[in-house]
Amino acid sequence: MPIEVEIVSPEKVLFSRAVDMAVMPGLEGDIAAMPDHAPMMLLLRGGVVELYQDGAVTDRFFVAGGFADLTATRCTILADQATVLADLSVDAAQARLAGLEASYEAADKMNVPALDLLMEKMQSARAEIEAAGGQAA
């Protein structure tokens, strides 16, 4: 029995299909969504969502944070940003990371919420660099 997975970015629905399992980058560690999963909401960190069919990865997407809504029959991923893994660019992610690091250095160190947001975005950019570099092989 498959689970319906939908990956939605602010721009569009990137993926909508039944799969055997979806593994996503939870804020506190990776988690798998499978049929009959207990209902839960999950915060996502920047990382790769892998979709499985018949024991093999069929699709991979990079998400730059967001959250997932899991039920026994569905997994809806609402991503801050989502991209097919093959479309990632190491150079673009490195440029984004450099800009974020400069913003962090220039930021008011007493503004903790702003610093936390910048740190989260830097983590996501680092995860994107890793994902983009790993998919080229």
Image (spheres, grey):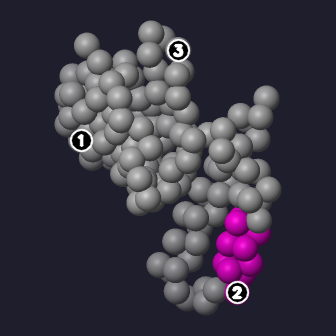
In the picture of the structure, the residue carrying the numbered disc 1 is 40
Q: Nearer the viewer, residue 6 or 48?
A: 6
| Quadrant assignment, res 32 | top left
Q: Residues within 10 Å of mark 1 (few under 14, many from 20)?
A: few
Q: Identify the element where label 3 is drawn.
A: strand
Q: Nearer the viewer, residue 2 or 104?
A: 2
Query: What's under tag 3, amino acid-wise?
Result: Ala
Stretch of the chain drawn in magenta: 96-106
| Quadrant assignment, res 11 | bottom left
Q: Is residue 50 left or right of residue 101?
A: left
The image shows residue 22, relative to residue 43, as above or below, that is above
Query: What's under tag 1, amino acid-wise?
Result: Met
Magenta region, main secondary structure: helix
Disc number placed over residue 84 in the picture, else none: none
Nearest to N terminus: mark 2 or mark 1:
1
Is 104 within the magenta?
Answer: yes
Q: Is residue 116 left or right of residue 35?
A: right
In the picture of the structure, the residue carrying the numbered disc 2 is 106
Q: Is residue 123 left or right of residue 38?
A: right
**Furthest residue in direction top, as rendered:** 54
Residue drawn at x 35%, y 29% as measured from the top left: 17
Quarter of the image that includes the N terminus: top left
Q: Is residue 109 visible?
A: yes
Disc number placed over residue 56 in the picture, else none: 3
Residue drawn at x 27%, y 44% as measured from the top left: 69
Q: Identify the element where label 2 is drawn.
A: helix
Q: Nearer the viewer, mark 3 or mark 2?
A: 3
Query: What's under tag 2, amino acid-wise?
Result: Ala
